[in-house]
Amino acid sequence: MSIFSEEDQIRLSEKGIDPRKAMRQIETFKEGIPFIHLSRAAVTGDGIVRLTIEEQEGFRSHYNQNKGKIRTLKFTPASGAASRMFKALFTFINEFNPDQTSFEGYINRPDQKDVKVFYEGLERFPFYEEISSRISGDGMTEGQKFMAFVSEMLTEKGMNYGFYPKGLLPFHRYANSTATPFAEHLKEGAAYAQSGNLSYLHFTISPQHRELFRETERQVADPIRRETGCDFDITYSYQKEATDTLAVTPDNEPFRNDEGQLLFRPGGHGALLENLNEQDADLLFIKNIDNVVTENALHEIAAWKEILAGYLLKIQAKAFSFSRMLVDGTVDHDLLKRVESFLQAELNVCFPTAFPGYSLEEQIAVLQDKLDRPIRVCGMVRNAGDPGGGPFWITDAMGNESLQIVESAQVDLADEDQQQIFEKATHFNPVDLVCGVRDAFGQKFDLMNFVNSKQGFITAKTYEGRELKALELPGLWNGGMAYWNTVFIEVPAETFNPVKTVNDLLKPAHQP
């Protein structure tokens, strides 16, 4: 008998969720999600490629020679809320009373260092002049003026930045204007993701921000077109409701709100795999909305995107050639050895120890399966203490080894051996991917067929003071791409300039 009432089933149907899928989610909560087993950290020469200057130039040239023959698309997750950027400042306006507390004493407290950095760098922020023009500092103390500035910036009565999506905040100030990450991504599209003076860009956004994005597009697209000589085809999509996941109680029963209704939660960035799967392109660039630079630093960003794309096109051409040979049936022992060597050396594919003893037909089937997969070439940055996932060799329950991007939450850090391997990582994942999503015969892969459903996340949350367990889908570039062919290439730290807190805007990459 189903645990879902008739009302539950109507609710599931409205969201496009099959009740059987919801039941599988409950089973996942009950069974738990096993930790990933790390074999070793991927390092230069063992999972990470370091290119010479000559190789960089060669791959970049190859991409620019061939980009007119393919359709490229720049895919940007852009639904992130700006509120998290301002966490310290929200605490400030909720706690600080300028009439009762010394401003200097408050910002010099050890727990208020972020507020102090913001205050001391105030005039260097791109929004400083506009917000200052909206408040009057006459007769105010320094604390009162700063409180007025922050309140004007964040609250609904003012600029309401606390509501905005991160992609539409002013990030950079130029001589006569400011620029949002959305605008900077258009400039990037013109710099490296265009073909025939047309750049395709896709942004995943929240429904409540659609008009804000549309309005920003109307304001900035034409000036950037005139400046770059590049036209834009810009599309948007939302994280699908059908990718929401069921919340459960600590006892793994469906969690219900005070009205007795099932509670659902967003499935995390892994839900965007469905959005990615709907894109019609030969080559996809993936990069987060907040990882942008000012115009004067764009040249190096574009160069490395072209290098990664050129590498992908060359390696993909080899994979396509071998795939066609196997399908054509002109197979001999020498060809099989060449395909096996290519997969191992250039696509980091590992074969079972029993593979040499397989029959000819079995070996051909395995090689075809390994070739017939999407390919991702991922930039990896030297680890300088930044949080985030990293590149590792992992071993699954069947003893199969593969190269993956792994988050700390996926690893049993209570296991001393696993912790030591995790800490040996020399690089981390900046989310800098170029993806080939068609097969040797031009057919688009169904990306949902290459997901490891056992690489999701279970987290503890609360709802209206009650504890619950939430399930995140396998991450877009973690379990969501677990069965892709993977290449990691070392890229300069200068290509990674995210804005996680507002004070990151004071870093050189964001200061023209």
Image (cartoon, rainbow, N blue to C red):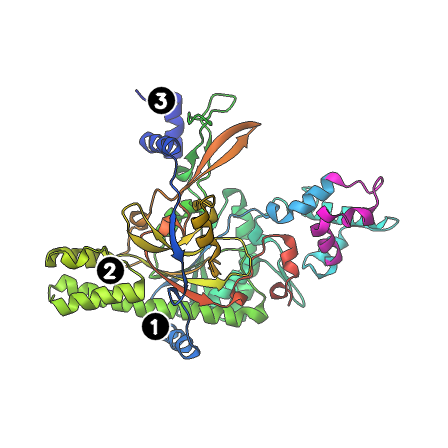
- CA distance for labels 1 and 2: 22 Å
Q: What is the chief secondary structure element of the magenta stretch?
A: helix
Residue type at numbered disc 1: Asn
Spot occupied by residue 22 in the image (x, y as percentages of width and height):
36, 31
- Where disc 2 sits, the SS reads helix
Q: 271 and 183: which one is in front?
A: 271
Which image quadrant is residue 97 in?
top right
Is any atom of residue 277 visible in this view?
A: yes
Of pointers 2 and 3, the one earlier in the residue sequence: 3
Above or below: residue 404 compared with residue 111? below
| Residue 371 tag number | 2
Is residue 127 left or right of 136 when viewed as pictured? left
Mark 3 or mark 1: name the one nearer the start of the chain.
3
Mark 3: amino acid: Ile
From the top left corner, tell me how far across and down residue 450 is, in percent. 30, 50
The kind of residue on which mark 2 rests is Leu
Magenta span includes 97: yes
Identify the residue under disc 1.
66
Residue that appears at 32% across and 22% down: 2
Which residue occupies the foreground of this view, 183 or 346? 346
Disc number for residue 412: none
Q: Is residue 230 visible?
A: no
Crowd band around label 3 with a 10 angstrom C-alpha radius: few (<14), some (14–19), many (20+): few
Which stretch is magenta?
95-121
Residue 268 within the segment the image draws in magenta: no
Few, some or many residues within 10 Å of mark 1 (<14, 14–19, 20+): few
Image coordinates of residue 285 in percent, x first then y, are 42, 61
Element under disc 3: loop
Residue 367 is situated, as x and y percent measured from the top left of the image, at 20, 59
**Distance between the Cα atoms at labels 3 and 1?**
55 Å
Identify whether 272 is placed above or below 73.
above
Residue that carries the numbered disc 3 in the rendered image: 3
